[in-house]
Image: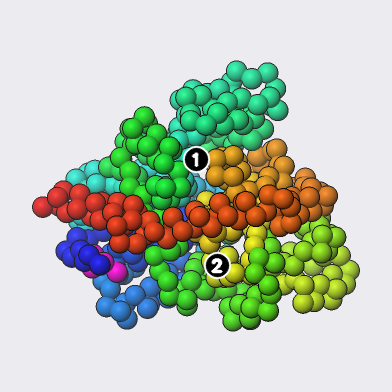
Amino acid sequence: EKRHGLLHIFFFPFMAEGHSIPLIDTAKLFASRGLKVSIITTPVNAPLLSKSIERNRLLGHKIDVLVIQFPCVEAGLPEGCERLDLTTSPEMGLNFFMATTLLAHPLEDLLKEYRPNCLIADSFFPWSSQVASKFGIPRIVFAATCFFSLCAAQCLRLYQPYKRVSSDSDPFIIPNFPGEIKLTRNQLPDFVKEEIVFSNFYREVKEAELKSFGVLVNSFYELEPTYADYYRNVLGAKTWHIGPISLWNTNIEDKAKRGKESSMDKNKCLQWLDSKEPNSVVYICFGSLANFPASQLLEIAMALEDSGQQFIWAVRENKNNEVWLPEGFEERMKGKGLIIRGWAPQVLILEHEAVGGFVTHCGWNSTLEAISAGVPMVTWPLYAEQFYNEKLVTQVLRIGVAVGVQQWARIVGDSVKKEAIKKAMTHLMASEETKEMRCRAKSLAEMASKATEEGGSSLSDFNSLIEQLRCKGM
Ligand code: UDP
């Protein structure tokens, strides 16, 4: 194992689990190889972060947390609303993004004081490139998605094919993009196809990506070689892939509490899985942000019951007193299904041999965690770039069954009926294709773990990034 001393790297994660989990894990990876690491965060997020690096500090890694104030009040947000999942409406979400742009000043102060060798900041902080350049500090973009979606987004931005279709449901092919990938205008984010407040910000994000010192991607070359090459050679981005980031840290306690503390004791969860046959359980979870209405949860529950499928289902907790389960559901499902209210130890669940399928919203972390564990998926994209990720899973990698969502939505609704859920789940878990999909998924999982081992593509990109920073730093 190579050790890299001396360099001081700043990490600046965007305050949403899907962005902060992988970047904090990346920071820990850098620290474990001897680099000095500082992670920038805000008061509400600091305690959890400090706790999550405790073990690394005990191991003697040089890693610390720098806290800057988050301008809630200035941005019209309630006090303490310092994470995207704490916003409760699209308007608040927008205010949240605007609030983060006000972090340029405190960031500048920190850079002036510490003069790190590099700033690795989330793609949602496009302005951080300029701040860093004032001090001659290279800024690397942390892209919280795959090459496929990075390329798709750039091609859509450059060629705007959605302007040339006659209806929202008319499929078009992403131009100049390998693989003849079809989308509809319905499946595109509103800020891509319309000119709204967020569009300008998004444009800055996409431009900064290609203009920065480089882009750090949580993926591995063998998963999507065509798109990694396309991003580098055609779109001209300088990039390093260092994923799957979830595979670097094999400590079981760390895995159990990536992001938040798990709401169910990990041992209870794992013992339950231990009592099941291999590949006999489906895991259902829609990431850290999605908040389905009770009516949609009811459809999921009915599909689970009707299909007779064994399951672990993670449901976000804030359902108040709404009825979201059919009467007597949990009683009837005893032994058959487990509901986790709140935060699930996702990586541990996916890695358990009893889990044979994953119903996912195609958030990139969830998708890659499933791939790393060799688990095929039912794809149920909701928003962000998830409709692109779905295409990668179902059409390019062919390890997923689409539940059939057609509409990108800022607020998730209840459009997917129990029949569609049941059908996709049965296709995934018990059809002629099940074996093939599992086989492909397992072989990708093997490639994933090789990528992070000695001689692997991700480890070698990681080492080459540090060499480049060292040369720059001398
Ligand atoms: N996650 C988890 N437990 C949960 C929900 C989510 O550990 O109950 C983790 C999941 O493993 C992943 C991240 O949170 O690392 C979610 O990121 P993703 O990109 O999949 O979706 P997002 O939350 O950004 O929509």
Ligand 1 quadrant in view:
bottom right
Q: Residue at x 30, y 51 (%)?
A: 461
Q: Which residue is mark 1?
A: 149
Cβ atoms under marks 1 and 2 closer than 8 Å:
no
Q: Amino acid at mark 2?
A: Glu
Q: Residue furthest right?
A: 327
Q: Which residue is mark 2?
A: 351
* Residue 33 within the segment the image draws in magenta: yes
Q: Position of residue 309 (x, y in %)?
A: 77, 64
Q: Is residue 136 visible?
A: yes
Q: Rounded to the nearest whole Å, what is the CA distance between mark 1 and mark 2?
A: 25 Å
Q: Residue at x 83, y 50 (%)?
A: 419
Q: Residue furthest left?
A: 474
Q: Position of residue 166 (x, y in %)?
A: 68, 18
Q: Position of residue 146 (x, y in %)?
A: 46, 46
Q: Where is 47 relative to 68, above or below? A: below
Q: Is residue 118 left or right of residue 404?
A: left
* Residue 371 within the segment the image draws in magenta: no
Q: Which residues are magenta?
A: 32-36
Quadrant in the rendering for residue 56: bottom left
Q: Secondary structure at mark 2?
A: helix
Q: Please tell me which of labels 1 and 2 falls first in the chain.
A: 1
Along the line of sight, the residue nearer the viewer: 278 or 162: 278
